[in-house]
Image: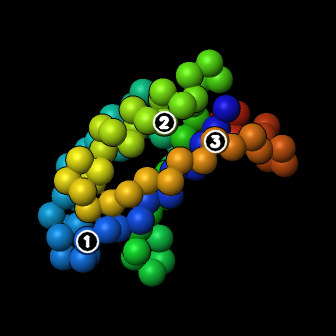
């Protein structure tokens, strides 16, 4: 199963950037675990997005854990919208990542 996480900043960008290094280090850990496939800020920079691969038997728990562990979320500078996703077109390409 795949999922999209949409992050929306809840504080001014000046406050958000104070947590960027910790957030990116956290995302690096998710990537190393095979959960995160891609991430980056939105344009304009009002938040960001994550493309995740999550276990079929633990979608909700995994997504809640991703959100709850993020320094952005912990600091209250961003909120998460978690969207489990079942792609059809392009699934083969995603599975190769």
Spot occupied by residue 92 in the image (x, y as percentages of width and height): 79, 37
Q: Residue furthest top?
A: 57
Q: Quadrant of residue 64?
A: top left
Spot occupied by residue 45 in the image (x, y as percentages of width and height): 40, 76
- Location of the C terminus by quadrant is top right
State the residue in front, 12 or 2: 12
- Location of the N terminus by quadrant is top right
Q: Are marks 1 and 2 in contact (CB under 8 Å)?
A: no
Rounded to the nearest whole Å, what is the CA distance between mark 3 and mark 2? 9 Å
Q: Which badge, 1 or 2, is on the more N-terminal residue?
A: 1
Q: Which badge, 1 or 3, is on the more N-terminal residue?
A: 1
Badge 2: residue crowd in 10 Å (few <14, some 14–19, many ≥20): many
Rounded to the nearest whole Å, what is the CA distance between mark 1 and mark 2? 23 Å
42 to 84, vertically: above or below: below
11 to 31, vertically: above or below: below
Q: Which badge, 3 or 2, is on the more N-terminal residue?
A: 2
Rounded to the nearest whole Å, what is the CA distance between mark 1 and mark 3? 26 Å
> Which residue position holds label 1?
11
Which numbered circle lies on residue 93?
A: none
Q: Are marks 3 and 2 in contact (CB under 8 Å)?
A: yes
SS for callout 3: strand
State the residue in front, 37 or 14: 14
**Residue positioned 56% across, 22% down in the render:** 58
**Residue positioned 75% across, 40% down in the render:** 86
Which numbered circle lies on residue 84?
A: 3
SS for callout 1: loop
Badge 1: residue crowd in 10 Å (few <14, some 14–19, many ≥20): few
Which numbered circle lies on residue 63?
A: 2
77 to 15, vertically: above or below: above
């Amino acid at each position: 199963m795949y999922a999209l996480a949409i992050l929306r900043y809840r504080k001014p960008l000046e406050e958000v950037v104070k947590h960027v290094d910790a957030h990116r280090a956290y995302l690096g850990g998710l990537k190393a675990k095979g959960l995160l496939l891609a991430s980056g800020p939105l344009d304009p920079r009002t938040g960001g997005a994550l493309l995740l691969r999550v276990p079929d038997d633990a979608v909700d728990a995994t997504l809640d854990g991703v959100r709850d562990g993020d320094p952005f979320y912990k600091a209250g500078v961003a909120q998460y919208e978690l969207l489990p996703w079942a792609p059809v077109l392009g699934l083969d390409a995603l599975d190769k990542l």
